[in-house]
Image: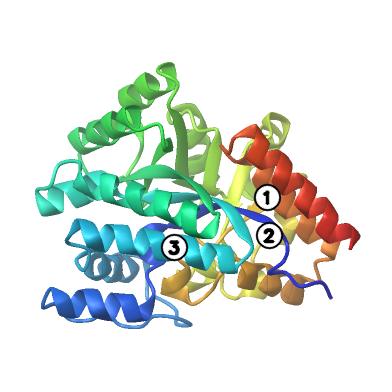
Amino acid sequence: MRDLTGLPKAHLHVHLESTIRRATLAELAASHGLPVPADTAGRRFAGFREFGDHGTLVRACLVTAADFRRVAVEFCADEAANGVSYAEVTVTAAAHEARLGATGMPLAAVLDGLAEGLDRYGVATRVILDHSRRRDHDRLRRTLDLARRHPEVAAIGVAGDESYPLAPFAPLFAEAHDAGVRLVHHAGETAGADSVREALTLGHADRIGHGITILADTDLVAEVRGRGVALEVCPSSNVALGVADTLADHPLPRLRAAGLTVTLNTDIPATVGTTLAGEYVRVRDTFGATDADLAGMARAAVDASYAPEDRKALLRKGIVGWLAD
């Protein structure tokens, strides 16, 4: 079996706040007089609310510019160790600003750390700024403003509880779309295929975070397949959040069999105790994915990414070489 760490990869769906190393999290918590959030690796959350509460405790440990910069640098180091040379990392920048009363600081510090990560580890990155569906219009406006100011931002989008609709944000999504700001929404994770359709129509999405419930709507499957809209599939995260009962029950093979563009991602790696290379191993071991299958998903992630064309070309060449070796 080929070493899956050596498979060149692009990582499209990963939240920076959920990549923090346990040792780093303990140090940050201690430095700010906060309790250390529980180690959740390998466990299953009782529901989305419990997961959200855990995330709140983790985010509270990020206070200073040095904190944000550190976790960004360490993210790049860990991605490099997993064969990732390009990543689009999601950051909830406007929420950090509101929490800390620090306009501009969180994103600026993250970008500094990612720049250092490129210099030290060779991992190129762009940022996706997300916004909770439960939060107000003004915070999404701030998210859009940040995207317009920073060329390192590849896209914006919404995340969180899908029982909150996208309709209140539709005018801002239209404005972002008209301004050339890409939109990538979480949809079809904890809600059905209608959530994916809403993300594509009202949300102007050109990629879908998760999207695993889409198979219930054959017309939508045909539309998404025809448009080549990529799904950012995160199997271990889906199991940890109870979206899939077990990894073996996950619809990933059926999504691929339906001809959909499937990319493999971690979403919340430190929270669930996985890595991107580890996720590829789990897919191979659980579903019997061949090397060609895995290389195909790696290639799909490269093609669907917002990486510069020269970076894409290098990754594609590396994937071909890995498969031929």
Residue 104 image-quadrant placement: top left
Q: Residues within 10 Å of mark 1 (few under 14, many from 20)?
A: many
Q: Is residue 243 visible?
A: no
User: Where residue 310 appears, x then y in whole percent?
Assistant: 66, 36
Q: Secondary structure at mark 3?
A: helix
Query: Residue at 21% of width from left, 52% of height from top?
Result: 96
Residue type, numbered disc 2: Leu
Residue type, numbered disc 3: Phe
User: Where residue 25 appears, x then y in whole percent?
Assistant: 29, 75
Q: Nearer the viewer, mark 1 or mark 3?
A: 3
Q: Residue 75 bears which disc, if any?
A: 3
For marks 1 and 3, the one nearer the N-term is: 3
Q: Which residue occupies the foreground of this view, 97 or 318?
A: 318
The vertical placement of 108 against 287, above or below, is: above
Report the residue marked by disc 2: 252
Q: Residues within 10 Å of mark 3 (few under 14, many from 20)?
A: many
Query: Residue at 12% of width from left, 73% of height from top?
Result: 32
Q: CA distance from mark 2 to mark 3?
A: 26 Å
Residue type, numbered disc 1: Val
Residue at the extreme right of the image, as rendered: 324
Residue 228 image-quadrant placement: top right
Q: Secondary structure at mark 1?
A: strand
Report the residue marked by disc 1: 262
Tell me whether the residue at label 2 lies in contact with that at label 1, contact meaning CB atoms closer than 8 angstroms: yes
